[in-house]
Amino acid sequence: MRVYNFSAGPSTLPLPVLERAAAEMTDANGTGQSVMEMSHRSGDFKPIIEKTEALLRELMEIPPNYRVLFLQGGASLQFSMIPLNLAAGEAGAQKKRAVYVETGVWAKKAAEEGVKYADAVTLASSGDRGYTYIPPAPAPDPGDAFYHITLNNTIVGTKWNTLPDTGPVPLAADISSCILSEPLEVSRFGILYAGAQKNLGPAGTTVVIIREDLIGRAPSWTPALLRYDISAGEGSMYNTPPCYGIYVIGLVLEWLKGLGGVRAMAELNREKAEILYGYLENSKGFRSPVEKPFRSLMNIPFVCTGADPEARKNRETRFITEAAAEGLVNLAGHRLVGGMRASIYNAMPREGVRALIAFMEKFEKQEGKK
């Protein structure tokens, strides 16, 4: 029996994609071989990566002066690659200033990596209230190397609804948990990056979308695999890319296009989020800890109500265990914040959200009888 998987990542994939991948496991595109067996430089794999890039460009409306790279190392490696390529100097040279807005754990980790390669400055933080809101974003200095934000904060469930005005400074954004969930004006950014394992495909592939004028700025001592210019020049094939992950991303993009594209998906995502937040607003047993104007469409944390912390924690443990027994899995909140979290990415159907709400209603009634 298929369960409803609310994991923040690796997360649920569309069932039609999984079924097609299974059907093509031993014979992809009539080649008589699996994608996992193909040479990445062969004529069999070339149309796969080209199709995947073309679909991503179409669905995200990526301008022609941006390059699409399929890399490895997860979004976390981009915490290093961006400052290394855009702000680090030659040996002995001064580092350029790069600015960050800290809105959660991953945003903080990005800034911590930035310190190693740039004169990294955190302009604003929402840590004073447990990252439950997006702080006002101060303007950068015109000469800053880049301005980094985490567009959707997976752990705490917040999102940027208004992008900061960075003027001539390139805006860099981690979009791992919100890519393709709603329209995004790519031209507002210098660099976008996303780990695949939330909204795109299996873990192991990272998509980077970078404006061409930002390529080629890395100092000469930068390792080859960490240079955007080398990856771009080799068509993401300086070394063997994550071939199977790229193939599955292509299948996910075909599925999304068949549903009507990003705008159609955004309507569905807003509907799913609205019914879950609506339930939480009227519930006596559960609540959302996130301030309303900043609530994510993709990751919805919630906690049990009540004054006694130990009693709340016990109820939350029971909820997670009993939900899993009903086929609603991976609802535990991140270990750093506790509680529960429902990640309702593109591949989560309405029925999954409705099933979760039905179980929450049942659990709330049972707890009310005790």
Image (cartoon, helix red, strand yellow):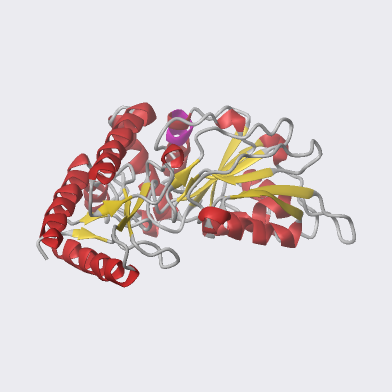
- Can residue 364 be seen here? The reply is yes
Q: Residue at x 79, y 35 (%)?
A: 142
Residue 112 placement, left or right of 267? right
- Can residue 225 be seen here? The reply is no
> Quick one: 242 or 304, which is closer to the camera?
304
Query: Picture coordinates of residue 198 (x, y %)?
Result: 39, 51
Query: Picture coordinates of residue 87 (x, y %)?
Result: 77, 50
> Quick one: 220 or 81, which is closer to the camera?
81
Q: Main secondary structure of the magenta part?
A: helix
> Quick one: 114 or 35, which is closer to the camera?
114
Q: Quadrant of the N terminus?
A: bottom left
Query: Picture coordinates of residue 181 (x, y %)?
Result: 39, 37
Residue 84 placement, left or right of 69? right
Query: Picture coordinates of residue 115 (x, y %)?
Result: 72, 60
Question: In the rendered picture of this protein, how many numbered marks are placed on residues?
Answer: 0
Q: Residue at x 12, y 66 (%)?
A: 370
Residue 136 placement, left or right of 336? right
Residue 302: in magenta span: no
Q: Residue at x 42, y 48 (%)?
A: 290
Dividing the picture into quadrants, the one containing residue 310 is: bottom left
Report the residue that reaches farthest toward the right: 92
> Quick one: 219 or 88, which is closer to the camera?
88
Q: Which residues are magenta?
A: 54-58
